[in-house]
Image (cartoon, rainbow, N blue to C red):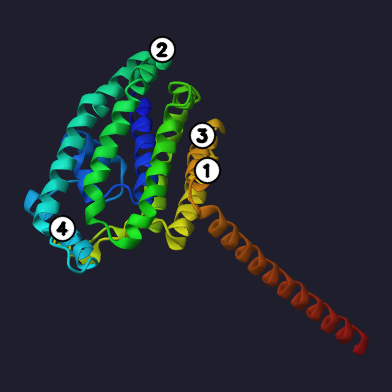
Amino acid sequence: MEPTRNGTCQLVAVCMALIACCCCLSAAQLLALPSKDLDELGAQYLPAGFGQANLTMADVQRILQQKCQEAIAERPGSETNATKLSEDLQLGASRLGECIAELANITVVLDEVEKARPRGDLDVVFEKYCLRMPQARACLSEFNEALLPCLTREERQHNTMVQRIIGKLLDFVCYKNGDQIALFIAEQGPECLEQHKDHVSSCFQKTFGHYIPSQLNVTLTDLPELVLGPRQCAELHEFEGCVVRHLETCSNITPSNIVESMFRYVRKESNCQQVIDRVTRERSEALGLRSSAATVTSATIALLLGLAVINV
C-alpha cells in the first residue's frame, strides 16, 4: 500500500508546485499548512527548500513585514502601517491553516484512500471531501483579502487571474466529486508517480529552483514576485514537458494524461498559451535552421567527394 500513499502525496506535491508557480503560495500560505502535513510533503516529495525546517516565526514576521513595506512604498501618502498589515496577514495565514486542517488533514486523507482502494470505494472518500470545497474556497478568499494590501501594483494586477487559476484547479480535483483523482489512483497513477518522484523533483528544481532562497536569512530581494508573466509561463511549460515526458514511460498512459490535463487547466485560465506558442514556434524554427544547415553541409561534403572521385 505504500506506493499508493506516496504516489498520492506526490500528486498533491505536483498540484502544490502548479499553484506555487502561479504565485499563489507565498511564504505565509505555505506556513499556513499544518506543520505535520507540510513536513510530510516537503521532506519526502518536494525539492529541498520547501520544508519548514529551522524557519522561525520571527523569520516569517520579518519577511512579511518587508513584503508589506515594499507594497506601501508604492503608495505615496499612505498612512498604512507595514507592521499592522503583516500581523493581519499572519493572522489570515493562521486561520487558513486551521481551515485546511479542519477540512482535509492530508495524513487522514491518505489513510482513507489506502483503505478504500481495495474495496473500490475511492469515489466515496473523494465525494466526502469535495462536498467541503465551498468552505475551502471561502477560506482561500478570506486569506487573499489579507494578502492583497501587501502586494505590489503588478502583483495585484495578476491576482485576479491567479485566483481564477486556483479555482479551476480545485474544480479539476473535484470534477464529478473527484472522478479524475479516483481514476488516477485506479489506473496505477500513484505507482507511476512514486516510480518517477525523483525525476519530478529534479524537473521542479531545474525550472523553479532559482526561486527558492538558498539561505535562511532571506531578504526581500530573494523573494520572487507573485506574478505569472512570460518568464513564469515559459518555466511552467518546461516543467510540464519534463514531468509528462517521464510519466509517459509508465506502463499505463492514463496518469500522464491526467497530470497533463492539470497543466492545461492552468494554461487555459492564464495568458500563458500565447507565450508557450511563441516559445514552441521559435524552437521549431531554430531546429529547422539547424536541420537546413546540416543538409547544406551534407550536400557540400557529397559534392566535394564527387569532385575528388572525378579528379582521380
* Residue 197 location (% of width, % of height): 39, 41
Crowd class of label 1 (few under 14; some 14 to 19; many from 20; radius 10 Å)? some
Task: For the C terminus, give its image quadrant.
Answer: bottom right
- Residue in front for this viewpoint, 63 or 4: 63
1 or 2: mark nearer the eye:
1
At label 4, the amino acid type is Ile
> Circles 3 and 2: CB distance less than 8 Å?
no
At label 3, the amino acid type is Ile
Q: Which residue is mark 4?
A: 63
> Circles 1 and 3: CB distance less than 8 Å?
no
2 or 4: mark nearer the eye:
4
Which residue in the rendered view is the most extreme toward the right? 310
Crowd class of label 2 (few under 14; some 14 to 19; many from 20; radius 10 Å)? some
First-in-chain label (1 vs 3): 3
First-in-chain label (1 vs 2): 2
Q: Which residue is mark 1?
A: 264
Measured Cα–Cα span from mark 3 to mark 2? 20 Å
Task: For the N terminus, give its image quadrant.
Answer: top left
